[in-house]
Amino acid sequence: MSMPDTPPRPINSALLIPIGIALNLAIGTVVHILKLPIFLDAIGTIIVTLLAGVRAGIITGVLSFVLAGALVNPSYPWFSGTQVVIALFTHTVAKRGGYRRLFPRIAFGLLLGVATGLASAPVIVYLFGGISGSGASLIAAYLIATGKKVLEAVLLSGLAAEPLDKMLQTLLAYALLRGIPADILARFDRTLLERNGLLK
C-alpha cells in the first residue's frame, strides 16, 4: 500500500533573514566602496519578502542597514525606512501577481525606484545636507555646484539613480530565485510564488 504524498515541510522564515542580510551587505558594500551611482543593497530584502512575507522582508532590510551603519557607513541606519518601503512595495505588487512577466517586472522595478527616491530624499536633505556618501551623491553634488537647490538636486539625482537601481535589483532577485530548485521554493508561500511565475 503506497503512502499518500505529504506536502513538504515549510522552511522557517527566520532562517532566511541572515541570508538576506548577508546578500544586502555583501553586494551593497562593494557598490559603496566603488562609489557607483547605484546601490544594489536590497536584493536580499526583495528575495526574503517574496519567500517569507513582508514582516521578514522588513526585518531583513532594517537589520541590514543597522549592521551596514556599524561596518560600512554610519549614514545607513537613517535610511532604514527606505528598506521598509521596498518590502511593502514588493509584497503589495507580488500579492497581485505583478511580477509574473518581464515587462511588468521592469515597470514595477522602475516605480519602486521612484518610491524609494522620494522616501530617501528628506533624509538626505535634512540630515546630510544633500550629500550622504553614496555614489548617487556625486550627482547631487554636481547639480548643487551648478546652482540647483539642495532639495531639487537630491530629487533629480535620486530619480536618475533609483529607478535603474531598483529595476536591476528586482531583476537580479528574480534571477536568483529562479536558480533555486522548485521543490525547495515550494516550501515557502507556494501561492505567492505561483502567482508571480516562480512555480509552475
Image: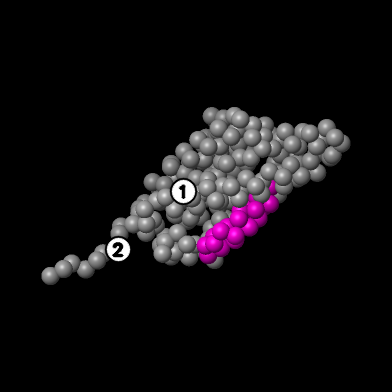
- Circle 1 sits on which residue? 176
In the image, 86 versus 26, the foreground residue is: 26
In the image, 151 versus 158, the foreground residue is: 158
- Circle 2 sits on which residue? 7
Pair 1/2: label in front: 1
* Location of residue 48 with respect to 36 vertically, above or below: below
Residue 62 in percent (x, y) is at 54, 43
Which structural element holds mark 2?
A: loop
Q: How is the image coloured?
A: one colour
Q: Residue at x 44, y 45 (%)?
A: 17
Q: In the rendered structure, which segment of residues is drawn in magenta?
A: 97-117
- Tell me how far mark 1 sits from mark 2, CA to CA: 24 Å
Q: Residue at x 29, y 63 (%)?
A: 7
The chief SS type of the magenta part is helix
Q: Quadrant of the N terminus?
A: bottom left
Which structural element holds mark 1?
A: helix
Q: Amino acid at mark 2?
A: Pro
* Location of residue 25 with respect to 162 vertically, above or below: above
In the displayed image of the protein, which residue is found farthest to the right?
147
